[in-house]
Amino acid sequence: MTAARDLAAGRADAMGQLVTGMRDYFEAVIRPQWPAVTASFGADLDMRTRCLATGGVAAMLNGLHPSVRFDGSVLTITDYPGDRDLHLEGRGMVLVPSFFKRRTRPLTLIDPQLPPVLVYPVDRSAGMLAARQTEALSALLGRSRAAILELCAVGGSTTSIAAQLSQSPSTISEHLSVLRNAGLVASDRRGNAMLHRLRPLGTAMLEGQAPGGTAG
């Protein structure tokens, strides 16, 4: 109770303890799951994007969860805890995927000053497969080089990759040299920066495919 009162009072030492505890919890519990979490988000985004492109908004919303029904004008969540109506009145709605919200119906987060939020559970299956591929890649290349290869998929400089992985630019440069010599990464100088991107072989390896495009 004392800790809760200190937090409510906004005491700096209490906030510091909370932040430290959250970081420790992340390292002990969340960090080991992080490859699966990020892979699930990526797979979910790809799936929702394809669904939107092929079936429109209705198909995308109706595919969020079995409890969700969208008839073109009204979105309904069956068996929602509490009976309420929310009118967008020209506002958008933010869709937020949740990795840890398993098998439960979507929930809304409502702030009158902000767009309404709908939190829904992601489909973990595609993400777990991608995570297993990441682990296999790490076993083959080492965790640092596998992580660098993933970052090169979206492109970046030596400095930016080093910052994201909390390593020195010289260390990242050495790893990139190995990946480049293996034909996985291409590097181009732009001004004072060296930018890196995947070569076709690197893309195939990252996606768990043979160079011809067949999954291995």
Image (cartoon, rainbow, N blue to C red):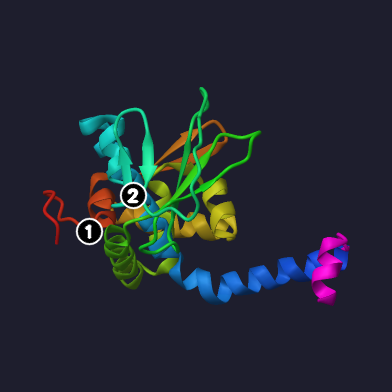
- Image quadrant holding the N terminus, namely bottom right
The residue mark sitting in front, 2 or 1, is 2
- Image quadrant holding the C terminus, namely bottom left
C-alpha separation, residue under disc 2 versus residue under disc 1? 18 Å
Residue holding disc 2: 44
Residue holding disc 1: 208
User: Residue 74 appears at what percent x and percent y?
Assistant: 37, 33
Residue at 57% x, 72% y: name it: 27
Which tag, 2 or 1, sits closer to the chain's start? 2
User: Residue 107 appears at what percent x and percent y?
Assistant: 47, 51
User: Residue 111 appears at what percent x and percent y?
Assistant: 63, 40
Classify mark 2: residues with Cα within 10 Å, few (<14), some (14-19) or many (20+).
many
Report helix, strand or loop for mark 1.
loop
Left/right placement of residue 24 relative to residue 51 reads right
Quadrant in which residue 2 is drawn = bottom right
Inspect the image, locate mark 2, and give the three-letter code of the amino acid beneath it: Asp
Quadrant in which residue 133 is drawn = bottom left
Q: Which residues are magenta?
A: 1-11
